[in-house]
Structures are given as C-alpha cells and as structure tokens.
Amino acid sequence: MDDLSLLIDLHISADRQGPGGTAQTRLAIELSGLSEQQGLKIADMGCGTGASTLLLAQDLDAHIVAVDFLPDFLDALRSRAAQAGLADRIETVNASMDALPFDAESLDAIWSEGAIYNIGFENGVRMWRPYLKPGGILAVSELTWLTASRPAELEDHWHRQYPEVGTAASKMAVLERNGYAPIGYFVLPEHCWLDGYYRPMQLRFSAFLARHASSDAACAVVAAEALEIDLYERHRSFVSYGFYLARKIDAAHPALAAAPKPIEHGMESSAGHQADQR
C-alpha cells in the first residue's frame, strides 16, 4: 500500500481525523451567529468522516455539503449520517478544496476544521471567498503559534511540515487583507489533542501494524505520528490550532461586517497537527 492508503487505513475508523471537539465546534457555531439564521447552505471543506459535518447538520437549520478528496472518508460519513438520521441534510462531494463545484456567492458559510493547511491558509481563504454570499461566514481551525518564540526543534519540525504556521495576529492580518472582518477566535484546549485525537490514534497502532505485517511503510507512518505526539506532549504550550471566525466584507453591503462578536481568549492551549490530508 502507498503512504496515502496507509494513512486512510489508520484514520478512517476515528471519530475525527484531526484535533477538535464537540464543545469547540459548538462554540464556533455560537460565535458565528449561524444558529440565528434559517435555510442555510454550508460547505464543510476537508470534512473527513464527518465529525463537524454531523454537528452542523444537527444544530443548524442548514443543508451541509461535505467536501473531501478521499472517497473512503465520504463513504464513512454517509454511513454515520444515516445512523444519526441526518442523511437528508447532508450532501457529499468528492472534490479537492481548490477545485470546487460551487456557484459564486452560493454559500452562507464555509467551515473547515483542521484541513485548510492542505492548500495553505491564505490561498484557501482567498480562493473560497468568491463562493460566500455577501456577509457570509468563514470558520476555520488553523495551526497557530501561541508565543512569540518557540523551542528550536518544535519550530524546525512545523516549518518543515507547514511553512505557513504563524501567530494569531498574522492569521488575522491574512483575513483582513483578503476581504474578511474577524469576528471571533479561540484556541483548541489540550483535551482536543489528547482525548479527541492522539490517545485514540495510539490505541489503533497495534492493530494497524498487525494488518500490514509491520511493513517498513506502516512502521514509518506510526513513527511519524509518534514523533508528532512526543513534540506535543513536551511543547504543548507553544502551538495549537486557533479557531478563526470571520465575515466576508462586501463593498456594496458594508453593514454586514458591523458589530462583530467579542473575541474569545483564555482557553487551555496545546499543540498538535493532523497527520492525514482531508
């Protein structure tokens, strides 16, 4: 099996393919103001097996279009949606996040938890903006430095994996110069990494290696994940995902960017990164 197939096999049975949590998705929904609206159309980019997709469909009056380039993840999402009685509210689209089938200004919101890094934060927010209606909502979680300086080994690792990692201030500036007004921000807490992602993954390592006869490729996948977990456990106070909420600014409708919600701070911080592309 190639590396991508191995990563799919390791992660497809997980509730989430990256750090996150139910409470954090719901906090983002609250900050977005979407719960106050009806008849929404929302795209969940890089949806994986659908943890955030299912919550959006459950909590909002919305039709959710779940986008992922991996058909296996979409199959798992459809199964989960059927079991939850939400199949009629969720549509799946097998597509890359940089080649989308949406019409201009057709979406009320774009959601993406732990996936925008696949095409880069600035590239993603710029490419996705035309699909949003005037005043539409962007909600994304993104790898973010929490401090002005970091241990060298941590900085070297993440610059190799994702050169666009930056501070929250730098991410806010990206949003502002690409036609958005930031309306909310918070940091994913430690349990989103440990309880929601890393510990369940560690429990799958043995069965994963057994399925692949501890091949060199399978062992390399586990070693890479173990290195990431070790870096998190030792340096969790320096890096995490920041969850960013922003509203599309439209020159013809300037009032839509007014009265932002207060920015949220003070949540327990931690470090980590999603291993597989979604």
Image: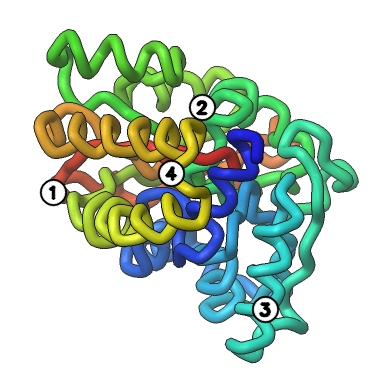
- Residue drawn 49% across the image and 20% down it: 174
Residue labelled with disc 1 = 268
Q: Quadrant of the C terminus?
A: top right
Q: Quadrant of residue 119?
A: top right
Residue labelled with disc 4 = 214
Query: Which percent across, then down, holds residue 219?
Result: 41, 36
Callout 1: few (<14), some (14-19), or many (20+) C-alpha neighbours within 10 Å?
some
130, above or below 8, in the image: above
Element class at badge 1? loop
Element class at badge 3? helix
Pointer 4 and pointer 3: residues touching (CB < 8 Å)? Answer: no
The label nearer to you, 1 versus 4, is 4
Q: Amino acid at mark 3?
A: Ser
Element class at badge 2? helix
The label nearer to you, 2 versus 1, is 1
Residue labelled with disc 2 = 175
Q: How much space separates mark 1 and mark 3, taking CA atoms?
A: 33 Å
